[in-house]
Amino acid sequence: MAKNCLVGQSGGPTCVINASLLGVIKEARKHAEIGKIFGCKNGISGVIHEQFIDLSKYDDKKLELLKQTPSAILGSVRFCLNKIEDYEKILEVFKKYEIGYFLYIGGNDSMDVVNKLSIYFKEMNYNCCVIGIPKTIDNDLLFTDHTPGYGSAIRFIANSVCQIYEDTSCYQNGRVTVVEIMGRDTGWLTAASKLASLVSKGPDLIYLPECAFNLDDFINKIEDIYQKKKKVLVCVSEGIRDDSGKFLVEKFAYNQDNDVFGHMQLGGVSSVLTHIIKERLNIPVRAIELNLLQRCFAITSSKIDVDEAIRCGSYGLRQALFGQSGKMVVIKRSKKEKYHIMYRLVDVNKIANQTKYFPKEWIINDSDISSCYISYALPLMNQEIKVVYENGLIKFFKL
Ligand code: F6P
């Protein structure tokens, strides 16, 4: 008897979460074992509140727009699954809608939900395969070469930084420009600023959270470069920390909120640094926070990223149909010179709530990135998608 499929989106948005949704829907349509395809609104919270969308009704042509529609069309959530009544409600709703396959697209916090639900369903003898589909611009999930969402984010970052460089380098007497890039605890995104050096000279200094940030050393380097060139371009991760592990924004800025997982909402470190530079060196400064743009700027999405996100979705569903559960789809890269990848599954309990850091051996003198990173990152972002526009504006899929 056919069972229904449910898909949800969770965590911070990216350019390609909807592409993974497309992969799930397209795959589901090929299999007679699957009845309806539902989406839950705002991730797992849409299950608890029984807010389902029937995705079976959309035609293939319209769905193609999901490839260039950023963020999460089903809505997203940051949700910590702890309360027994939530588990019970989820089971009740799954039974009611006869859900036999649950695909959850998310990052390391969302994989906690995949892990907990797959265990719970087994304990309750409820037959449902739960599979995690990876996504995050942060690229910080273990066991996968990279995460869907990362390639598009670094394409935006690299292109933004080289264009910022062109702007900031035209004056004889320029200023210190500090560009702030996301990534929370890891420097994968900020490292992408180095790719700008393939076009223009790129950043003078790059700081990642993986190395303790020394303020005095930073000021000395800025002074030195400014004296020689009269302009400095610095790229910093939002999550840089001092040697005691404290975020710089935590030390100098106010109003930092925590999310349900206890992660501090970062942002503002470029302003903090430019204020300190101004105060100590009295030279012209400008802070630029790439902010949300780096997550959802679909015009510069990477083709490989979109294609892989779709395949992660379809592979995940095929594995669920084989009876796999409690696993996440990972991307394995072969060691061959030409870029070649394979999709595999890894137990989600090894990935949930864990962090994959940027390799220390790819960081040079605490403030530069090695060419090994360039070789790693280029294949993830070196092709563009063909964007459909209307009135000069990108066209989105609408539910
Ligand atoms: O997890 C992705 C991410 O974009 C991080 O890089 C960033 O710190 C965080 O999300 C910001 O989250 P929010 O949307 O809650 O501000």
Image: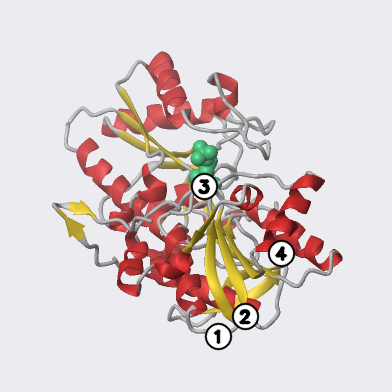
Residue 363 pos. (x, y %)? 53, 51
Q: Determine crowd level at label 3: few under 14, some 14-19, many 20+ residues with C-alpha closer than 10 A.
A: many
- In the image, is the residue at mark 3 within 8 Å of ligand 1 by its beta carbon? yes
Looking at the rendered image, the disc whose residue lies closer to the viewer, 1 or 3, is: 1
Which label's residue is closer to the chain start, 4 or 2?
2
Q: Name the residue under label 3.
A: 12
From the image, tell me which residue sits under label 1.
32
Question: Who comes first in sequence, dot 4 or dot 1?
Answer: 1
Quarter of image, res 382: bottom left
Q: Mark 4 points at which residue?
A: 95
Is tag 3's residue or tag 4's residue first in the polypeptide sequence?
3
Query: Real-space Cα distance between discs 2 and 3?
Result: 33 Å
Seen at 64% across and 37% down, the residue is 263
Q: Mark 2 CB in 8 Å range of ligand 1?
A: no
Q: Is residue 300 above or below residue 280?
A: below
Mark 4 lies on a secondary structure that is: helix
Q: Is residue 13 above or below residue 150?
A: above
Q: Kindly identify which residue carries mark 2.
A: 2
What secondary structure is marked by label 3? loop
Q: Residue furthest left?
A: 391
- Between the residue at mark 4 and the residue at mark 2, the CA separation in whole angstroms equals 14 Å
Q: Do the residues labelled 1 and 2 touch (CB within 8 Å)?
A: yes
* Spatial separation of the CA atoms under disc 1 and disc 3: 33 Å
- CA–CA distance between discs 4 and 1? 20 Å
Q: Which of marks 2 and 3 is in front?
A: 2
Which amino acid does the dot numbered 2 rest on?
Answer: Ala
Viewer can see residue 366: no
